[in-house]
Image (cartoon, helix red, strand yellow):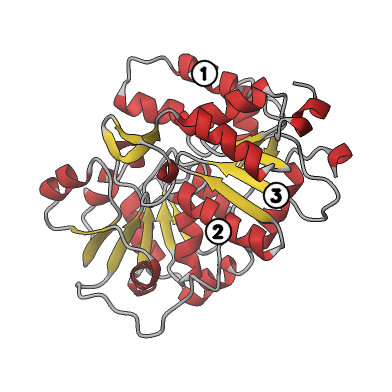
Amino acid sequence: MKPAERWSAGLGRASGAEQLRILIVTDAWAPQVNGVVRTLEILGRDLVQLGHEVRFATPADYITVPLPSYPEIRLALFARRRLTKLFRTFRPDAIHIATEGTLGLAARAICRRHAIPFTTSFHTRFPDYIHARLPFVPEAVVYRALRWFHGPATAVMAATPSLQQELEAHGFHNVRLWSRGVDVEVFHPLPGATLPYPRPIFLYVGRIAVEKNIEAFLRLDLPGTKLVVGDGPARAQLARRYDKAVFAGPLNGAGLINAYAASDVFVFPSRTDTFGLVLLEALACGTPVAAFPVQGPRDVLGDAAVACLDEDLKRACLRALKIPRASARAYAMTRSWRACTAQFLTNLAVDPAAR
C-alpha cells in the first residue's frame, strides 16, 4: 500500500499537529515486574507530560497463553486483526515495537504489509537467555532470527554504547542509542526506613530466573540478611535451596522504595543484562551497588565511586558497605529520564511529509 493509499484505508499518519500520536507495542506488561515494563511505563508517562498522545498495545487486551517455562509472561493469541483495528482508529504518527513476542510479530507484519515505518528496541539478550535454558541451540541461529525481526526497522534502539557496538558487530543496522534514566522524584531516600531483618541487608530486586545468576549472590557468605524481591520461574527452587535468605515476593510503589531505602547494599549478580534499571533505582534511594564488572553495570556506573565492581562478588558487597549513601543519591540525580525520552523521540520514524 502506497503512503497516499494509507490515508483512505485509515492507516495514514497525522498531519498538522505539533505533537505526536505514538503507538508502543509490547509483549512485556503488568503484572510483570521487570526493567522493560518499568522503562515503558516511565517513558509513556514522560511522553504524555511532554504533550504527546500515547497508546500501548499490550497482552492485557488479548486472549493469552503462558510462555512455556515462564508462566508470568503471557503471549497474545490472534492479535493481528484487533491490532490492525487499533492502527486504523488511533492513526499513529509513530510506531515503536518494543518486544519480539507475538504482539511484536503482529505489529511488524502489519507495518511491513502497509509500508508503515517503525522502530524497535533491543531490551533482552536472547542468545544468552536461550543458551541458559537450551544450551544446544546455537547462538548464531538466535541472532539470525533477531536480525530478521529488527532488520526492517528504521532504528533499532539500544540502551548503551557497548550494546550498540555489540549489535553492530552481529550484523544489525541503524542501531541508535536510547539510554535509561530514573525518576528521582519517585525513587528517593526515606530517612528512618527500616526492614525487620538483621543488618546489614543485601538486596536483590528483579526477575528470579536462571539467566539472572542470582545463585552467585545467594551462595555468598555474608553477614546480616540476603533479601530477594521479585518473582520468576526459579523462585520456589531457590527459596528451598537457600532457606536463610528472605524471599519477599514482588513489591511495587512504597513497598519497593522502602526496600531499596532500608537496605545497605544493592547486589546485581547478572552478567547478561543490557542495562539494569534497578541499579539507578537503588542509587536514587541512596543505596550503593555491588556487581560484577560486566557490560550492564560498567555502562550504567562507569568508574563512579557509588559502586564496587569486582569478580569477587563478596568482596564487592563488603566494600560497598563503606560507600556514603549521599554519594549514591547524588549520582542518580545526574541520570534524568527526560534526556532519555528526548533520545527516544529523536529516534522515532515520523514521516515529515505527513506533518
Judge the density around disc 1: few (<14), some (14-19), many (≥20) Cα neighbours within 10 Å.
few
Ranked by sequence position, the earlier of labels 3 and 1 is 3
Near-viewer residue (62 or 196): 62
> Real-space Cα distance between discs 2 and 1?
29 Å
Q: Nearer the viewer, residue 222 or 351?
A: 351
Q: To which residue does mark 2 refer?
A: 42
Q: Quadrant of residue 271?
A: top left
Q: Residue at x 11, y 47 (%)?
A: 240
* Of callouts 3 and 2, the N-terminal one: 3
Q: Is residue 122 above or below residue 19?
A: above
Give, as a three-letter code, the residue at label 2. Answer: Ile
SS state under label 1: helix
Place of residue 114 in the rendered image (x, y in percent of width and height, measured from the top left): 69, 24
The residue singled out by tag 1 in the image is 145
**Picture coordinates of residue 132 (x, y %)?**
33, 28
Q: Is residue 101 visible?
A: no
Residue drawn at x 51%, y 18% as measured from the top left? 145
Q: Nearer the viewer, residue 149 or 276?
A: 149
Tell whether 2 sits left or right of 218: right
Count residues near mark 3 (Cα–Cα under 10 Å), then give few for <14, some for 14-19, many for 20+: some
Gap between marks 3 and 1 measured at Cα: 30 Å
Q: Amino acid at mark 1?
A: Ala
- Find disc 3 in the rendering and name its residue: 21
Q: Residue furthest front?
A: 8
Which quadrant of the rendered structure holds the C terminus?
top right
Amino acid type, mark 3: Arg
* Alpha carbons under labels 3 and 2: distance apart: 17 Å
